[in-house]
Image (cartoon, coloured by chain):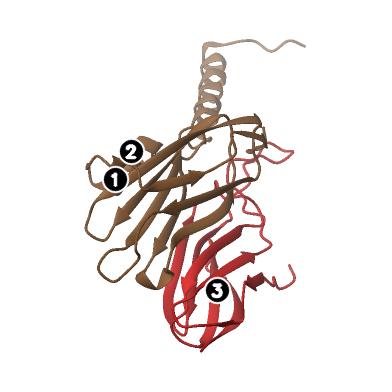
Amino acid sequence: MTVRLTRRNALEASVGALAMAAFGAISPVRAAYDSADLIRKFTGGKAPTEGKVKLDLPEIAENGNTVPMTVAVESPMSEQSYVTEVLVVGDGNPNGGMATFHFTPLSGAAEANTRIRLAATQNITAIAKMNDGSFYTASKQVKVTIGGCGG
Amino acid sequence: MAEIKPRIKLDRKEAKKGDLVEVKALVQHIMETGQRKDAQGQTIPRKILNRFTCTVAGKQVFAADFEPAVSANPYIQFKFKATESGPVVLTWTDDDGSKIVGEEKITVT
């Protein structure tokens, strides 16, 4: 027995296919912000100065799943002059943001270490915000051999 | 899941006033990014520890916001200035609102 292809049947079939295609296209949600946007939001449009920030990362990461990262900012960390926040972003991950560290004068040193995931070879940027409203930055490229996002 | 116990290490238990004390902490957590898919092709929902704070004698000395780019079983290392004796409380906040808390003590002379 053969199914007769009428105009109505054909129309219904194509609408169904279209709906499925549209659903498929929407489902992987992409990053809302990329790293440049995040930096602009963090500094409020101010251009950060190079220096004072030390970003310690391996040059080549064999495994992008866990890459040790140390960020240290030169500062007396006194009540008068201290680092309030440090933002770390990368330009090669699905989401630009990586971590934000918050310091107080009680921190004693603006220094933190954690382990991050890197999906691909990319530039990591750290931006430090001082209590007087100035910004300092440092960047480093890390070559990744095996990506850290299930790839 | 069994209750998660963070591993916390201070580089010294006793410090002189003004000394810098280094804290190292490791907590077991999957830190699911929300990017991966399971065998059926369904996206696994994001589940990470998004906030970490450390207080010493009730005063905040360090905090961090984590994004999915932080590795599974997040490790954190930072310093604080010894000013007064008291509990060193480390708190991680999960996406679902639950908290993992660990505590150590510091004696300042």
Q: Tell me whether circle 2 and circle 1 mark residues in contact (CB < 8 Å).
A: yes
Image colour for chain B is red
Q: Is residue A60 left or right of residue A102?
A: right
Image colour for chain A is brown
Q: Which residue is mark 2?
A: A37
Q: As shown in the figure, which amino acid type bears the numbered disc 2?
A: Asp
Q: Is residue A96 visible?
A: no
Q: Callout 1: helix, strand or loop?
A: helix
Q: Which residue is mark 1?
A: A41
Q: As shown in the figure, which amino acid type bears the numbered disc 1?
A: Lys
Number of the front mark, 2 or 3: 3
Quarter of the picture containing the C terminus of chain A is top right
Q: How many marks?
A: 3
Q: Chain of mark 1?
A: A
Residue at 69% x, 62% y: name it.
Answer: B28
Q: Position of residue A4 (x, y in %)?
A: 65, 10
Q: Position of residue A3 (x, y in %)?
A: 69, 13
Q: Which residue is mark 3?
A: B90
Quarter of the picture containing the N terminus of chain A is top right
Q: Residues within 10 Å of mark 3 (few under 14, many from 20)?
A: many
Q: Callout 2: helix, strand or loop?
A: helix
Q: Residues within 10 Å of mark 1 (few under 14, many from 20)?
A: few
